[in-house]
């Protein structure tokens, strides 16, 4: 693959990662409506994303696309887990 193709692939993968975490919105809505889902999967996803964001930002050569792709997972994972509990 060329450098341009790799960059395009990276941005597509980043977009898809963000969409994966945005897809928690329907579960959040169900949780808030009283149809509680399981909190374990989104809590583990939030923890996993936290580790990847930390890794991407603090490694020797920062990996901003990696951190950006996982940052929404922290937010949406925590919201989903918390709404499933409370």
Image (cartoon, rainbow, N blue to C red):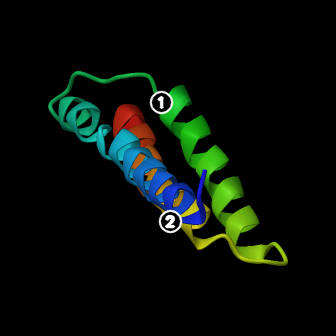
Q: Residues within 10 Å of mark 1 (few under 14, many from 20)?
A: some
Tag 2 near tag 1, CB within 8 Å: no
Q: Residues within 10 Å of mark 2 (few under 14, many from 20)?
A: some
45 left or right, relative to 13: right
Query: Is any part of residue 79 visible from this angle?
Result: no
Nearer the observer, 17 or 36: 17
x and y, in percent, of residue 17 in the image? 45, 46
**Residue at position x 56%, y 40% in the image:** 45
Q: Is residue 3 above or below residue 70?
A: below
**Residue at position x 64%, y 63% in the image:** 53
The residue wearing badge 2 is: 68
Mark 2–mark 1 distance (CA, rounded to whole Å): 23 Å
x and y, in percent, of residue 9 in the image? 49, 51
Which quadrant of the figure contains the C terminus?
top left
Mark 1 residue element: loop
For this orientation, the residue located farthest to the front is 2
Q: Is residue 40 above or below residue 2?
A: above
Q: Is residue 31 above or below residue 56?
A: above
The residue wearing badge 1 is: 39
Numbered circles on residues, count: 2
């Amino acid at each position: 693959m060329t450098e341009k193709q790799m960059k395009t692939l990276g941005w597509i993968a980043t977009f898809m990662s963000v969409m994966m975490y945005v897809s928690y919105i329907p579960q959040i809505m169900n949780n808030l409506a009283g149809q509680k889902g399981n909190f374990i999967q989104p809590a583990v996803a939030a923890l996993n994303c936290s580790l990847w964001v930390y890794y991407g930002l603090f490694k020797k050569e920062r990996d901003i696309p990696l951190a950006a792709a996982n940052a929404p997972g922290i937010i949406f994972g925590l919201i989903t887990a918390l709404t499933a509990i409370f």
